[in-house]
Image (cartoon, grey):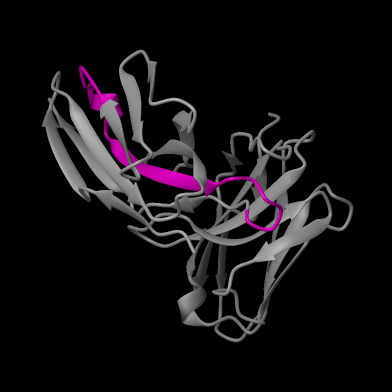
């Protein structure tokens, strides 16, 4: 399967713990996005990368959230000192885009986080 | 930032009838308008998209219309089938300008096809 893969698919953690999610995009895609989705809502933008450069980070993202894409391939999203409000589905998406022409976003199956 | 409103939030349609979902957006610089379908527990998947240089695009039973002047676009599904039941999201992307390339999604429409 050459689609976007995310790991783990499910994570249950206690409040205050740190969690890390990994995303492997489609190999030739230069852009990688992180979105968060809560029940009954549309995906909410968190951050995105063009190759290894993090180009934008949502104001909604507190300092407890950090994302990296060190070699322009896979990405990690870390949440420190988790809170119950962090419980959501974390979606990764990738695309091949050039200036003036954004390509289709392909989503992974998501990583569901439950903070107890 | 971009504000996307989507209506209705829920829609029930008799099998075989048509369904229409509408979205409005605020940023006149937006130029890419995809629609995603998300089945329960699954990933969002692109079903159709339109760019601002066209007013309508059709793919079999699915069509999207765009009115840039009024800043709204719509998804039309004809001859609906039970497998069309899902949540549908519209999304909007502004003209490319590094640093502002994120899709903003609507709040979703839960479509139920009644057999």
> Hey, which residue is sitting farthest front in the picture?
B69
Residue B4, magenta (yes or no): no
Residue A42 found in image quarter: bottom left
Residue B96, magenta (yes or no): yes
The residue closer to the viewer here, A96 or B82, is: A96
B50 above or below A100? Answer: above
Residue B47 percent across, percent down from the top left: 44, 29
Q: Is residue A54 visible?
A: yes
In the displayed structure image, the side of residue B3 where residue A70 appears, left or right: right
Residue B48 found in image quarter: top left
> Hey, which residue is sitting farthest top in the picture?
B60
In the displayed structure image, the side of residue B15 where residue B28 appears, left or right: right
B64 above or below A87? Answer: above
Q: Residue at x 70, y 37 (%)?
A: A97
Count how many numbered circles sit on residues in the image.
Answer: 0
Residue A83 percent across, percent down from the top left: 53, 82
In the displayed structure image, the side of residue A98 where residue B12 appears, left or right: left
Residue B111 percent across, percent down from the top left: 23, 39
Q: Residue at x 33, y 29 (%)?
A: B65
| Quarter of the rendering occupied by the N terminus of chain A | top right
Residue A38 found in image quarter: bottom left
Q: Is residue A116 visible?
A: no
- Boundaries of the magenta span: B77-100
Q: Residue at x 19, y 37 (%)?
A: B112
B105 above or below A58? Answer: above
The residue closer to the viewer here, B110 or A55, is: A55
The residue closer to the viewer here, A114 or B8, is: B8
A64 above or below A103? Answer: below
């Amino acid at each position: 399967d050459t689609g976007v893969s995310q790991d783990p698919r499910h994570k249950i953690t206690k409040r205050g713990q740190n969690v890390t999610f990994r995303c492997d995009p489609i190999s030739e895609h230069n852009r990688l996005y992180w979105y968060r989705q809560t029940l009954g809502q549309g995906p909410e933008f968190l951050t995105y990368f063009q190759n290894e450069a993090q180009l934008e980070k949502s104001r909604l993202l507190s300092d407890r959230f950090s994302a990296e894409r060190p070699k322009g391939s896979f990405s990690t999203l870390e949440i420190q000192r988790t809170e119950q409000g962090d419980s959501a589905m974390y979606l990764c998406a990738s695309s091949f885009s050039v200036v003036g022409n954004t390509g289709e976003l392909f989503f992974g199956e998501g990583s569901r986080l439950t903070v107890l | 930032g971009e504000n996307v409103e989507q209506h209705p939030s829920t829609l029930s349609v008799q099998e075989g009838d048509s369904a229409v979902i509408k979205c409005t957006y605020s940023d006149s610089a937006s130029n890419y308008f995809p629609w995603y379908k998300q089945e329960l527990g699954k990933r969002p998947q692109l079903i159709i998209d339109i760019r601002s240089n066209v007013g309508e695009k059709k793919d079999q039973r699915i069509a999207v219309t765009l009115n840039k002047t009024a800043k709204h676009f719509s998804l039309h599904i004809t001859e609906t089938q039970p497998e069309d039941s899902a949540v549908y999201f519209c999304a909007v992307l502004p003209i490319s300008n590094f640093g502002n390339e994120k899709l903003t999604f609507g709040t979703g429409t839960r479509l139920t096809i009644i057999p």
